[in-house]
Amino acid sequence: MADYILIESRDPFESAEVGRFLELAEGLAKEGSEVALFLVQNAVLAARHGARTNLPNSGRTASLAALAANGVKVLADSFSLQERGISPNRLLPGVTVAPLSAVIDHLASGRRALWH
């Protein structure tokens, strides 16, 4: 089974498509793939403590913390957090701060990449 790095750059509070991307990450992890979700640019807004993102057509709400609890490695870009004034100690449980170079490391290890 292939392993993945999914890169999200959109603000989840402005685009319903972000929820579908999170559903994809969750589904790949449930199928047995190793999945890393890298949040960059405005996507880091969803990583703040208390933030929740609606999953489309599912009638439920899932947070990044729930994804992390279900096996998705959730990473938030350190520069994007800094630019938006989000302190690393105010992130959801299960969200790890990482530099952009983490994406390169995942690609070098052979993961398939999807950028949204």
Image (tube, grey):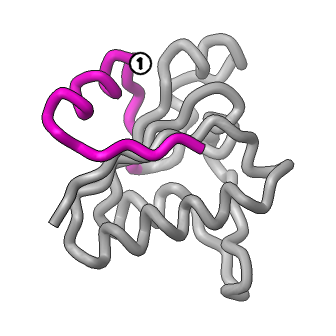
Is residue 61 one of those drawn in magenta? no
Highlighted range, magenta: 94-116
Q: Is residue 19 left or right of residue 6?
A: right
Quadrant holding the C terminus: top right
Q: Position of residue 94 (x, y in %)?
A: 39, 49
User: What residue is at 23 percent from the left and 64 percent from the top?
Assistant: 33
Residue at the right extreme?
14
Residue 107, position in %: x, y?
Answer: 25, 32
Please say whether residue 45 is visible from this viewpoint.
yes
Query: Tag 1's secondary structure?
Result: loop
Left or right, residue 52 beside residue 113: right
Residue at 23% x, 43% y is 111
Q: Amino acid at mark 1?
A: Leu
Determine the residue positioned at 67% across, 82% down. 60
Task: Give the quadrant of the N terminus.
Answer: bottom left
Q: Residue at x 64, y 23 (%)?
A: 86
Which residue occupies the foreground of this view, 6 or 75? 6
User: Residue 37 at what x, y percent from top left?
Assistant: 42, 46
The residue under label 1 is 100
The answer to which of 7 and 90 lies nearer the viewer is: 7
Q: Is residue 90 above or below residue 49?
A: above
Q: Is residue 55 left or right of residue 78?
A: right
The answer to which image quadrant residue 62 occupies is bottom right
Residue 109 in percent (x, y) is at 14, 34
Left or right of residue 55, residue 14 in this image: right
Q: Is residue 95 visible?
A: no
Q: Is residue 115 magenta?
A: yes
